[in-house]
Amino acid sequence: MSKSNDFNDENSNTSANPTFDSVLQARLSRRGLMRGGVGTVGVSLLGGMGLAACGGGDDDVVAAGSGAKADAKLLGFTAVSKSLADTVVIPAGYTASVIYALGDPLKTGVAAYRNDGTDTDYENRAGDHHDGMEWFGLGTDNKPSATSTTRGLLAVNHEATTDETRSSFFLHADGGTTTLPRPAAEVDKETAIHGISVVEVKATNGKWATVPDSAFNFRLTSLSENIQIHGPARGNALMVTKYSNDGTKTRGTLNNCGTGKTPWGTFLTGEENWAGYFFRSATDDTTRGGATANSVVSLKRYGRNAGSASRHGWETGGVDDKYARWNISQGVGAAIEDYRNELNTFGYIVEIDAYDKTKAARKRTTLGRFAHESAAFGKPVVGQPLAVYMGDDSRGEYIYKFVSAKTWVAADANPTDRITTGDAYLDDGKLYVAKFGSDGKGTWIELSIANPLIANYATYDFADQADVLVNARLAADAVGATKMDRPEWCSTNIANGEVYFTLTNNSNRAINSATMPPDSANPRVYTDIKNSSSAQNGNPNGHVLRLKEDAPGNAAVSFTWDVYVFGAESSAAPGTVNLSNLTGDQDFSSPDGLVFSPATGIMWIQTDDGAFTDVTNCMMLAALPGTVGDGAKKTLTYAATAGTLTVDTYVGKAPGEDNLKRFLVGPKGSEITGLCETPDGKAIFVNIQHPGESTAQADIATPAKYQSQWPSNAGYGAGQRPRSATIVITKNDGGVIGS
Ligand code: FEO
Ligand code: CA
Ligand code: CA
Ligand code: CA
């Protein structure tokens, strides 16, 4: 999300955690008045006629699953230019097609989507704001297949919905209500377009489409019944609600952002900005015992101060429990009589069996509660524990790693019961948080109730290990974790096991800040001038960090790190901002989605940006990164109030034009997010989220004023309202994507 009224930027980390020595000399990075034009040479536009193959690509680049060798023939495409057009731009020789948009039916008998605000039955349609996505191959025997390249399931996150004031206005004929109470019919649509979907996709004669009547298709929404709480917090007093008096289950999954795929073949979805959906009364601090009461400290740390309005006002939809559950104010009775603890049942990595909708989804509390993005496994090694890397996306939040108690068994790659296999690996283990050193080294600190810093933490009184996991942010504060510039996705380089994290941007990073000065792992502080007037401060363009564990086998407790690439405009000052020497074919801002292709080893970087959007819509780039330590130490000097501050950071080798190229630019107002592929690397699926998100609700009756009309303007579906959608990209010569 990039709009200022979105809910993913809450800044609740007021801890005084140590950051490194630092500081300043903020040189203004001004965009040149004369910018290059938005060229389209060598570019094809989605939505038009088919394009002739341009040749030049070979099919035999890398065998599927070969371990991600960076072949010289990869990135053979011509980089696309920055674009402000309301279309998807991809390189010549490629074709992109929309296959799955908001509202598309998932069941026989569901009406075709009218896209005029009169549609209903969203529990049986694609949800909104497509985000992370994973591929699950299907064989002709209807069983999981690691080799199928023409049939599979897409498991898709539906993160949120486009709103201005409360209403998800594209879903309602007249834009819906912006005042309270919200009508039940509007709330029911809005709760149903959140969650996840699983949809079968199939290629027939090379043309991909969904299978709308597939028995595999299903939805989970923000109100789906019987989502199981698993791990140490299952049955804990913190989980007791009117819906689950024994604290073992909850309803729904919410604000699903990044994803992961387990080595045993299940889908992981991260719950990100869930807190903003809940209402908390102005008197709730008092009811709970005042500002220092444990539950009040927890609620504040997770972004719900007393008096917080909810994003959509769903709690006002009526007296039914499905509306009441969005009000987390404490009542006069016991915890089983209200939803005072409801917030504790969100904020997890949720495991779902994409192949079997009858299996209850599990919220894995062992992996901690925060604003989850993706969940990336380290390379599984037989006889060694598994590692799962994760980020917490808010300003100044942390990077985490889970290490399983159970060691990897090769046979578990094809288990008979996938979700029970997940219980074995993900319900028992250790959660660590990252602390980055100014020497290019880092440590993983275990979040354990046995750690005196946690057990004796003055700010919050942890009851047990379940409490540590449910309040992982507070435990991480207690042990002095490093505040990061909004960790988004992470992904593992299959070739060497190094782990990459996008740090999307951070407007709170400031030279004279007591709590968030620049530090080695988050070293840049500068001003970016947007539209020749508005200034964006802090780290407006973000960077991609990477780390290499100091010991093999996933259980290492120390690592070495550097910055693979800094987001920047190519015209920005090379010594202070454009530290990676990006050119016009590579420059980007606010990296978010990050996915290594198992088939080719290409690292795909996707952006969700509000800083560079006067010049270009959000984009996707292809990268062939090197290794940690291939660059050099660099010292940044800043003039701070307290004197000159210097920050030592570690900058990877500048990517160079052969190793980092812009592959795609999205339509107006969209974010590019989520990517998966067929095992041969010849088809990739990518999500276009919230085209037209800056449309004013007041313009709902005037489509010509919409910021975007994509993908209707590309010939997909009825109506003129913009829709989030999955596209599939193939190479016209049948080759591997990126070659
Ligand atoms: Fe849903 Fe942090 O992006
Ligand atoms: Ca978004
Ligand atoms: Ca984002
Ligand atoms: Ca994201």
Image (cartoon, rainbow, N blue to C red):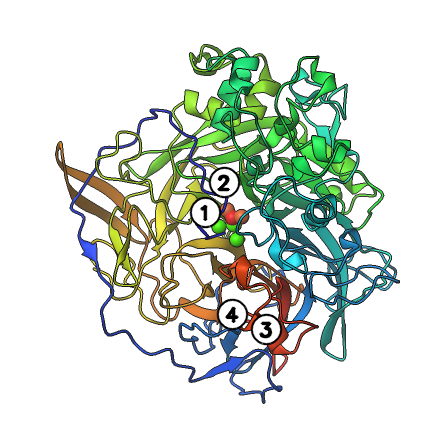
Q: Is residue 210 left or right of residue 591?
A: right
Circle 3: residue type? Val
Which mark, by number, is residue 501? 1
Q: Is residue 92 left or right of residue 237?
A: left
**Between discs 2 and 1, the one toward the N terminus:** 2
Helix, strand or loop at label 3? It is loop
CA distance for labels 4 and 1 = 37 Å
Counting from the top left corner in percent of width and height, residue 524 is at: 27, 47
Circle 2: residue type? Gly
Residue toward you, 683 or 180: 180
CA distance for labels 2 and 1 = 8 Å
- Judge: label 2 CB < 8 Å from ligand 1: no
Nearer the observer: mark 3 or 2; the answer is: 2
CA distance for labels 3 and 1 = 25 Å
Mark 4 Cα shell of 10 Å, populated few (<14), some (14-19), many (≥20): few
Circle 4: residue type? Lys
Task: Determine whether label 2 and label 1 are within 8 Å by CB.
Answer: yes
Residue toward you, 263 or 729: 729
- Residue wearing tag 3: 736
**Between discs 4 and 1, the one toward the N terminus:** 1
Nearer the observer: mark 2 or 4; the answer is: 4
Which mark, by number, is residue 593? none
**Between discs 4 and 3, the one toward the N terminus:** 4
Helix, strand or loop at label 4? It is helix
CA distance for labels 3 and 2 = 30 Å
- Residue wearing tag 4: 705
Which mark, by number, is residue 391? 2
Task: Determine whether label 3 and label 2 are within 8 Å by CB.
Answer: no
